[in-house]
Image (cartoon, rainbow, N blue to C red):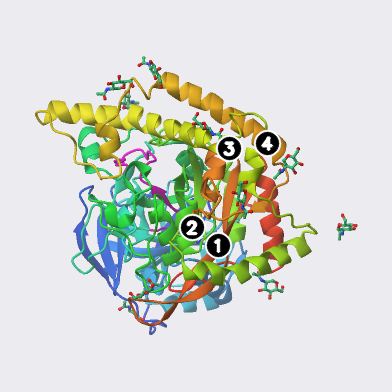
Amino acid sequence: MAGLLFSASLTALLASISVSAVPIVKRNEYTFILNNPYGDAIFELGNVSYLANTVHPKAVLATDCKAATSLLPITVVKTNESTISQATLEGIISSYLEADDVFSHDFLDGLYISSTVRSSLDASAVEYLGSFSTSFIFVDDSISGDGPFSKISIKSSADMPAGPYLASIEEGSVSLATVYRLCPDTYRTFLFGAYNTNDGEQNHSPLGVFLPKFWDPMIPPLAGERVAIKDLYDVKGLQTSGGSQAWVYITPIANGTAPSVQQIFDLGGVVVGKQKLAQFASGANPWEWQDEHYPFNPRGDGWLTCSASSFGGGCSIAAYDWLDYAIGSDTGSSMRRPAAVSGTYCQRPSQGMISLERVLPLGGASDTAGVFSRDPYKWIKFAKNWYSPSLHQDASITAAEPILQDFIANMSRILNMTVKEFNFTATVQNWTDPLASNLTTLTASTSVINTWSTWEVIGRSLTTAWVALFDGRFPPIDPARRPGWRAFNESRTNQTAYNAALVTKNIGVEWYERELNESPDASYLAALPKGTKITGANICPIFGCADFTVPIGQVPYQSNITFHEEMVPVTINMVVKRGCDFMIYNMIEKLVDEGVLKTVKTGRTAY
Ligand SMILES: *[C@@H]1O[C@H](CO)[C@@H](O)[C@H](O)[C@H]1NC(C)=O
Ligand SMILES: *[C@@H]1O[C@H](CO)[C@@H](O)[C@H](O)[C@H]1NC(C)=O
Ligand SMILES: *[C@@H]1O[C@H](CO)[C@@H](O)[C@H](O)[C@H]1NC(C)=O
Ligand SMILES: *[C@@H]1O[C@H](CO)[C@@H](O)[C@H](O)[C@H]1NC(C)=O
Ligand SMILES: *[C@@H]1O[C@H](CO)[C@@H](O)[C@H](O)[C@H]1NC(C)=O
Ligand SMILES: *[C@@H]1O[C@H](CO)[C@@H](O)[C@H](O)[C@H]1NC(C)=O
Ligand SMILES: *[C@@H]1O[C@H](CO)[C@@H](O)[C@H](O)[C@H]1NC(C)=O
Ligand SMILES: *[C@@H]1O[C@H](CO)[C@@H](O)[C@H](O)[C@H]1NC(C)=O
Ligand SMILES: *[C@@H]1O[C@H](CO)[C@@H](O)[C@H](O)[C@H]1NC(C)=O
Ligand SMILES: *[C@@H]1O[C@H](CO)[C@@H](O)[C@H](O)[C@H]1NC(C)=O
Ligand SMILES: *[C@@H]1O[C@H](CO)[C@@H](O)[C@H](O)[C@H]1NC(C)=O
């Protein structure tokens, strides 16, 4: 949720107000539950659980306060009005309630009113504040107000966002700890929740608690754009697993953050946790994993696959209103397939759009990083800033055809395009270069590219370490990788073969960019109809183009789980020449402006 990330330099005064009026809203009381392993406080207000970063508070403000109290939920309110009235305060509080799902009336046990201009609380404000039965009112030096106030000077200032905090009032100071609301991951898409430790060293900590009230992992979102991260990316302070407990056993906690994730922090994003993935980003189906419990897809009857490998991202975005974005990676179709089955937006960008340093590789030269979102405008905004430089359908595929044709008609009308249908296989095979026209050779090159990188970075060290640690044993890894790594033969697949495969791939990319430059064209994703040599999903990994998954509708199917009619999402893919990603974003924006593409909602149905 956006909107509460204000910051200002504060000089504050502490004041307590004695009140007697009846509260407008009955507040739930602060209830301490436990400290997590890092010393931060888990507490409840009514039936909602929160984490407060009490070890490293957001701000510690010096006061000449003599009294100390227990912990207190408070709200930081910012205004620049010269006269603060009841209407000013009511307006601000209702805007916070609307914009932020962490904030609630329960945080009005205390208030800190901050202003950068000289201002005064008028009589209506004083009376209104009194009606809260508020324990403490903190006000900036610059704010005057006649009322039953005993003012206490604050001798330091701090930059802090408005919103809810947990205050600890000590003799001579008050600490304000950032508050995170804990949300249960009911669809099991995360490995663990995480939060910024605020220790000045850019570390994150895992949430690290199990709450018997909830059997699901708890995820701590905070006001600000919330982002989940596929567990291939390093975040300083957190373990990177690649979806393998064996890998965790032999690797330390990340001592740095992937530049692509750092860019998200720099843009003001908040990382809320690490998400499940098919082990080492293989294409294995969820029911084929051993280390993680499979996630659930909120769409349809709830038993549809989340596909692979960035499935945690796709299904979580389709599931949770409290999550804005999920970062995945796409080598073969690892984002486009989860987006297709969850009915969400995602892209396989042009290769080279963003650094993949500190990201576990699958196929070094085919890996790309992308983002899932429900809202096309927000998705495009994120992508433009961030890249600063399946479901096995049977009957429903044909039911989806009219939606596809309708969408193509709308798109060509709005964008004044002519629709040209062509046979991709025939076009490629018609080319005269025997290498570039041979899709078998091109696909084999991609296979070398995709197996060598994972072997070199993960497979070799994991199998070697396990042999040494456990008396010659092979590591416990999922079936997707076991036969390939067991039989891995470096006299066949090696750096030389990898380099040769890159040359072959490059011939294909150059051909594609020269001959197939009439994009965008729609293609089927993971289906291999008669007469085709490769799936639509494989075109860009081979030819280096960008491929965007866009939800366009939904079709009914009869569920064998609920024995009821359910809806399954319909998505299309738009392919564009490498480097022309922004052209597609602009085109999609136009289609949203025209109402052809829409924001999808969370839950059983996308629309
Ligand atoms: C939590 O309490 C609020 C009222 O305080 C109520 O509206 C809501 O339904 C409750 N939620 C659950 C999950 O019990
Ligand atoms: C108050 O004024 C300061 C300085 O002009 C500005 O940075 C801040 O955004 C303003 N805050 C509000 C809540 O309007
Ligand atoms: C981070 O860890 C790696 C090994 O995992 C080590 O080589 C490197 O020196 C460490 N860097 C820092 C800054 O500690
Ligand atoms: C096409 O446009 C019409 C009118 O704007 C709209 O009713 C229809 O839902 C659109 N179809 C698709 C698949 O976008
Ligand atoms: C659409 O394209 C046709 C042919 O290229 C052109 O004559 C016409 O002016 C275009 N219309 C718009 C609205 O751009
Ligand atoms: C194949 O090449 C021939 C000769 O250049 C051309 O006439 C034909 O249209 C091409 N077919 C396809 C499918 O591109
Ligand atoms: C493609 O290359 C493979 C292996 O080099 C070869 O066996 C096959 O005949 C070639 N296919 C075509 C259509 O040239
Ligand atoms: C590895 O590949 C080489 C070359 O193809 C072959 O001679 C060798 O027997 C293979 N080794 C094993 C263990 O299969
Ligand atoms: C690397 O693989 C190629 C074939 O893929 C083989 O010809 C070459 O001998 C291998 N190199 C080494 C050092 O094993
Ligand atoms: C596309 O071209 C291939 C190769 O020429 C052919 O086998 C296939 O039947 C064609 N598909 C369609 C739908 O025309
Ligand atoms: C449901 O089960 C029937 C009977 O086994 C089968 O024919 C049908 O394909 C199934 N439908 C789906 C959507 O799996």
Secondary structure at badge 4 equals helix
Structural crowding at the residue carrying mark 3, measured as other residues with C-alpha within 10 Å and reported as few (<14), some (14–19) or many (≥20): many
Q: Is residue 196 visible?
A: yes
* Number of the label disc, if any, that sits on residue 544: 3
Q: Kindly identify the amino acid type of the residue bearing the numbered disc 1.
A: Thr
The Cα atoms of the two marked residues, 3 and 4, are separated by: 9 Å
Query: Which residue matches tag 4?
Result: 513
Number of on-image labels: 4
- State whether label 4 is within 8 Å of ligand 6: no
- State whether label 2 is within 8 Å of ligand 4: no
Label 3–label 4 contact, CB within 8 A: yes
Q: Kindly identify the amino acid type of the residue bearing the numbered disc 3.
A: Gly
Where is residue 463? Give x, y as percent.
Answer: 22, 30
Label 2–label 1 contact, CB within 8 A: yes
The Cα atoms of the two marked residues, 4 and 2, are separated by: 26 Å
The Cα atoms of the two marked residues, 2 and 3, are separated by: 20 Å
Label 1–label 4 contact, CB within 8 A: no
* Number of the label disc, if any, that sits on residue 339: 2
Magenta segment: 221-242
Nearer mark to the viewer, of 4 and 2? 4
Where is residue 525? Give x, y as percent.
Answer: 53, 54
Which residue does the image show at 72% across and 60% down from the upper left? Answer: 590
In the rendered image of this protein, does residue 206 appear above or below residue 514? below
Q: Earlier in the sequence, mark 4 or mark 2?
A: 2
Query: Which residue matches tag 1?
Result: 571
Q: In the rendered structure, does residue 290 fall within the stretch colored magenta?
A: no
Label 2–label 3 contact, CB within 8 A: no
Secondary structure at badge 3 equals loop
